[in-house]
């Protein structure tokens, strides 16, 4: 496939550039009036139109992208898209002014999703998640991480992970899998935290390892959920089975989650709506990626993460959706990029880099995804005609994605 007359080919980072830190996020290389050649599902070559080689200029499979931009697919590194039912009844509670904690105390929140999921069949969960994932792909997402965490029993957590494996087998994008049984304490373990942690460690983890069901282990480290000490215990147990840490950190408070994440060499710390100078100093010398979830802040009405301070501190920042039924019922990465600009004051270049190459880095796939480079996977999207690249986040209420290309082929859904 040959794409010609591209107004701007976006994200031309060197192939060996696997993550962008600090001010590196400011630079989004764009080649104007370009062509791009795809062969065998990979990016074969690209260049300026006035230097297109004659032997490829007449290829039969051509797309003209006149007036349009070509970007690497969004890489969404934090989602919870396997769930049994929506939670719009809690939406009304939020409008009434109920807090996240109050909704959970009233039987809503994560335990609400867990109760519904435990009753759903694997086929039902797969079918509903497949609809969500297809819609995300049509909105430009070309790589995704999916978490468990709405099961909270051995049977239901394994059921979720098997559903994610089915999605992985049937969809043409890379899917990373995260085990998140440490999402909340089931009601029967409300006063027996160690009992539930023992269940995770002694019963769930051996099955997950035996069936090779997960890449990462995650913990919701927060007041009222899992303490720093409990988080450390779970992460250590996961490491024995080869599961790398990803942490829900500092969503509602500065909880000590960052310190335990860095101690355990976490791939990413996600949320960070609450942070301080100690948070930044702890992360400064770590390799951990800071994954921010602005549509969660938008939906819950909680503070937006301080993206500018993280970037100023030379940290690698990624953006992701947090798509889930309770706090972020949307998988639209275009809106996330817009919120990164509008609410977190990121420049368009920073937000796009954070949603592509750094999102891929947060899933450890940036050697093949997240930027335009010869030899990388041809997971791309072509925009509608746009006056500039900044128009993409500027036009937040309208998708600018026109054509989705995965593994070098147009994806129709």
Image (spheres, rainbow, N blue to C red):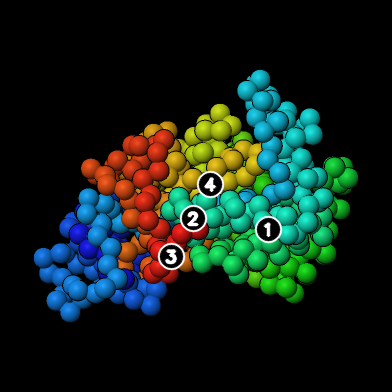
Residue at 78% across / 69% down in the picture?
Answer: 207
Q: Is mark 3 on a helix, strand or loop?
A: strand
Q: Distance between the residues labelled 4 and 2?
A: 9 Å
Disc on res. 406: 3
Disc on res. 137: 2
Mark found first going from the N terminus, 1 or 4: 1
**In this rendering, would 244 be left or right of 36?**
right
Front-most of residues 106 and 170: 170
In the rendered view of the protein, which quadrant contains the N terminus? Answer: bottom left
Q: Distance between the residues labelled 4 and 3?
A: 18 Å
Mark found first going from the N terminus, 1 or 3: 1
Front-most of residues 134 and 238: 134
Residue 165: x and y in percent read: 65, 66
Q: Distance between the residues labelled 1 and 4?
A: 17 Å
Q: What element carries label 2?
A: helix
Mark 4: few/some/many CA within 10 Å (<14, 14-19, 20+): many
Q: Are marks 3 and 2 in contact (CB under 8 Å)?
A: yes
Disc on res. 331: 4
Disc on res. 308: none
């Amino acid at each position: 496939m040959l794409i010609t007359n591209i107004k701007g080919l976006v994200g031309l980072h060197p192939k060996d550039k696997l993550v962008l830190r600090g001010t590196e996020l400011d630079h989004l290389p764009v080649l104007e009036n370009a062509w791009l050649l795809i062969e065998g599902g990979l990016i074969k070559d690209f260049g300026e139109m006035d230097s297109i080689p004659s032997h490829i200029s007449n290829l039969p499979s051509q797309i003209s992208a006149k007036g349009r931009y070509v970007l690497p697919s969004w890489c969404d590194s934090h989602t919870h898209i396997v769930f049994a039912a929506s939670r719009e009844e809690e939406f009304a509670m939020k409008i009434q002014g109920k807090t996240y904690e109050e909704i959970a105390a009233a039987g809503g929140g994560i335990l609400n999703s867990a109760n519904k999921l435990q009753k759903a069949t694997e086929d039902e969960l797969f079918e509903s998640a497949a609809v969500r994932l297809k819609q995300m792909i049509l909105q430009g997402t070309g790589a995704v991480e999916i978490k468990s965490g709405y099961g909270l029993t051995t049977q239901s957590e394994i059921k979720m992970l098997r559903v994610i494996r089915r999605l992985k087998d049937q969809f043409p994008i890379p899917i990373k899998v995260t085990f998140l049984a440490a999402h909340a304490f089931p009601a029967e373990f409300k006063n027996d935290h160690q009992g539930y942690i023992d269940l995770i460690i002694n019963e769930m983890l051996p099955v997950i390892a035996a069936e090779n069901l997960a890449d990462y282990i995650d913990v919701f480290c927060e007041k009222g959920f899992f303490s720093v000490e409990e988080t450390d215990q779970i992460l250590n147990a996961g490491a024995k089975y080869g599961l790398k840490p990803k942490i829900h950190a500092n969503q509602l408070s500065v909880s000590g989650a960052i310190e335990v994440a860095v101690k355990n060499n976490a791939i990413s710390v996600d949320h960070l709506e609450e942070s301080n100078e100690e948070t930044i100093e702890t992360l400064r010398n770590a390799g951990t990626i800071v994954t921010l979830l602005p549509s969660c802040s938008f939906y819950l009405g909680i503070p937006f993460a301080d993206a500018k301070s993280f970037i100023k501190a030379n940290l690698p920042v990624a953006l992701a959706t947090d798509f889930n039924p309770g706090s972020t019922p949307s998988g639209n990465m275009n809106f996330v990029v817009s919120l990164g600009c509008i609410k977190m004051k990121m420049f368009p270049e920073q937000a796009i880099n954070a949603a592509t190459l750094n999102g891929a880095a947060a899933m450890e796939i940036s050697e093949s995804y997240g930027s335009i480079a010869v030899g990388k996977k041809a997971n791309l999207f072509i925009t509608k005609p746009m006056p500039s690249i900044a128009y993409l986040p500027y036009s937040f209420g309208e998708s600018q994605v026109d054509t989705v290309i995965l593994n070098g082929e147009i994806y129709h859904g």
